[in-house]
Image: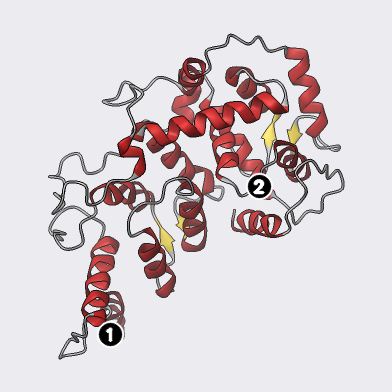
């Protein structure tokens, strides 16, 4: 996964012309794009497929706790909260197939043969049932997207891609059929429509957000490496960036002792961005300790910028203090 994301970033730096085909693309180009594409198939799947893409386990990890109350009502509103809901709240979210069908009013009939032919354009020459790195990169180029763009993550979600850096024939054909798209122009149109819906509905975005964690996992792993988590956070928040997001990334990058991000921390960070209130933060609530450290770190930075320093000089970096304390106990 890590290599895939780095390939994405490399591909983005070497921007290709919008319509350039790259049949001989090198292997360093776009492994992540493939997996992203795979994701999209699941979004358009039926209810069972949708459950596969978005596990039933709750990500409302804070449902039993009292939400933080910002000092100001609009203190931490993100853009998506200002849009009208599309009826996906309160557990009534339909499948992604229903969502796209509702958004796309025109009843476009897609041809199975056309979808098969489209798959053949991008399939791997050594595997008739897979679109791999080179094929995904060519698909991205034809769609006029870079492999590391938000739209490709959305495509992967819509196809319910089961693994990064590849689309299976079933994922590709069934996903596009449910998206009602059988050519490059219609795929791009559906992606644009879905992105607008994601901007408008917080619950729909939450499904994509949860999918992104699963999508980024290495096989047989349950946690994300910090490097991959940061890359995925930046990707999923491309269209709408939460308040203090750059501060959060700065905090993580400044502390190399933070090595892994578990699922609970990933899921709860979305809640944290919607309720963020540094000054009124209650560390007795059920937040992960990493959020406590982040808030303490931000408060320390605010004091420093105001010219106020800790007399003991012991709490300038709460996380470092905690790590040193843990290390000393290990030594003793």
Which quarter of the rendering shows the C terminus? Answer: bottom left
Left-right relation of 81 to 102: left
- Could you say whether the residue bearing mark 1 is in a helix, strand or loop? helix
Q: Position of residue 136 (x, y in %)?
A: 72, 40
Q: Position of residue 144 (x, y in %)?
A: 70, 40
Out of 173 and 326, give the one closest to the viewer.
Answer: 173
- Residue drawn at x 56%, y 32% is 192
* Residue 170 at least partly seen: no
* Residue 144 at least partly seen: yes
- Residue drawn at x 86%, y 43% is 23
Is 135 above or below relative to 254? above
Q: Quadrant of residue 59?
A: top left
Which label's residue is closer to the chain start, 1 or 2?
A: 2
Q: Which residue is mark 1?
A: 328
- Residue drawn at x 59%, y 34% is 155
Q: Which residue is mark 2?
A: 147
């Amino acid at each position: 996964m890590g290599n895939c994301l780095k390939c994405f970033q490399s591909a983005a730096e070497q921007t290709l012309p919008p319509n350039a085909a790259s049949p001989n693309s090198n292997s360093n180009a776009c492994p992540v794009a493939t997996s992203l594409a795979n994701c999209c198939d699941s979004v358009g799947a039926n209810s069972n497929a949708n459950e596969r893409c978005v596990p039933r386990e709750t990500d409302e990890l804070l449902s039993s706790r009292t939400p933080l109350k910002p000092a100001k009502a609009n203190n931490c509103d993100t853009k998506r909260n200002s849009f009208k809901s599309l009826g996906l709240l309160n557990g009534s979210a339909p499948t992604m197939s229903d969502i796209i069908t509702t958004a796309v009013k025109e009843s476009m009939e897609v041809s199975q043969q056309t979808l098969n032919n489209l798959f053949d354009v991008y399939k791997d020459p050594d595997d008739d049932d897979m679109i791999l790195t080179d094929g995904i990169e060519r698909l991205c180029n034809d769609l006029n997207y870079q492999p590391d763009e938000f739209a490709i993550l959305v495509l992967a979600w819509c196809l319910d891609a089961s693994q990064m850096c590849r689309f299976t024939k079933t994922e590709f054909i069934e996903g596009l059929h449910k998206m009602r798209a059988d050519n490059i122009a219609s795929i791009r149109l559906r992606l644009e429509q879905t992105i607008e819906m994601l901007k408008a509905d917080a619950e729909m975005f939450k499904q994509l957000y949860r999918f992104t964690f699963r999508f980024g996992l290495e096989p047989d792993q349950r946690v994300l490496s910090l490097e991959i988590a940061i890359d995925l956070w930046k990707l999923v928040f491309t269209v709408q960036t939460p308040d203090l997001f750059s501060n959060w990334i700065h905090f993580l990058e400044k502390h190399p002792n933070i090595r892994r991000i578990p699922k609970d921390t990933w899921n709860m960070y979305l809640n944290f961005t919607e309720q963020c209130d540094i000054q009124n933060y209650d560390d007795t609530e059920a937040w992960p300790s990493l959020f406590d450290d982040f808030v303490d770190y931000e408060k320390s930075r605010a004091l420093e910028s105001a010219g106020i320093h800790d007399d003991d000089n012991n709490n300038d970096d709460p996380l470092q203090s905690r790590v040193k304390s843990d290390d000393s106990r290990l030594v003793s």
